[in-house]
Amino acid sequence: MRKRLIAGNWKMNGSAAASRELVAGIVDGLGAAEGPETLVCPPFPYLAAVAAQAEGTPLAVGAQNVSEHASGAYTGETAPAMLVDVGCRYVIVGHSERRSLYGETSAQVAAKYAAAQSAGLTPILCVGESLAERESGATEDVVAEQLDAVLAHSGVASLAKAVVAYEPVWAIGTGRVATPEQAQDVHAFIRGRVADGDAGVAAGLRLLYGGSMKGDNAPGLLAMPDIDGGLIGGASLKAADFLAIVAAAATN
Ligand code: 13P
């Protein structure tokens, strides 16, 4: 049985005070009951403080991006080991906003994924198609290209220590959530493609759905056999909203 994971991607939102309050609210609400694994990914300036606040609680901390380089003259970048140093366990790589707004290629994302793993971080590899790509029937080709870049770079065995998030671009921040069936189809495709390389790795791989996931649509999505959790944007910015999804993951 794959352990469910509910991850919050705060994107570029909040403040020091707001992140303290949000983490306190989440930790408070997690309680002692056995539920999914939970993770928050705050903006870089707040990572160390959030990690210190979350230490000793069930809440894990991750970053939203990372350099593919280990150190050196890369102004403005953050090395994987630095993230480990301040208490991160996870890092998101290849988010569609990084790919589309900052021109990250699948090859660069694969390099970031490998660098993160080398430092001991668990990468959350994001894949997903745009609306135009979906409407032209290219969803599987797009997702395959994004996944294959990582498989070619790091090998299928590397996915034993990674998470994959399917985030259809048209569902991100739009309120237009993929139907459970639409998401399940792509999740099954991803798991199948990984299974072509290693059935055992595929069976253990956690696949998150991301894109307008909320407390009310989470149960339907999480009921699907290949949806193991969520990568949550907007609904991760309020403790009650995030906790509603955590609760759905505990019971669905
Ligand atoms: P929303 O939940 O706001 O649609 O964002 C999803 C996302 O991009 C998480 O990484």
Image (spheres, helix red, strand yellow):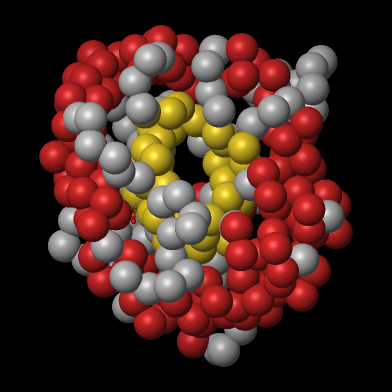
Relative to the observer, which residue lies in front, 23 or 134? 23
Residue 48 in sight here: yes
Query: Where 231 falls versus 218 (above or below)?
Result: above
Residue 110 in sight here: no
Residue 161 point in image, percent of width and height: 67, 44
Query: Where 15 falls versus 108 (above or below)?
Result: above
Residue 16 point in image, percent of width and height: 30, 14
Q: Quadrant of residue 123?
A: top right
Query: Where 55 falls versus 185 (above or below)?
Result: above
Residue 108 point in image, percent of width and height: 76, 46
Instruction: Give the residue displayed 60% in from the left and 78% down from the top.
Output: 189
Instruction: Give the residue displayed 16% in from the left and 62% down from the top.
Output: 216
Q: Is residue 1 left or right of residue 158?
A: left
Q: Is residue 204 left or right of residue 211?
A: right
Residue 153 point in image, percent of width and height: 85, 52
Instruction: Give the residue displayed 43% in from the left and 28% down from the top.
Output: 60
Relative to the observer, which residue lies in front, 224 or 17? 224
Q: Is residue 56 left or right of residue 95?
A: left
- Quarter that holds the C terminus: bottom left
Q: Is residue 76 left or right of residue 44?
A: right
Instruction: Give the residue displayed 55% in from the left and 41% down from the top.
Output: 92
- The mark total stands at 0
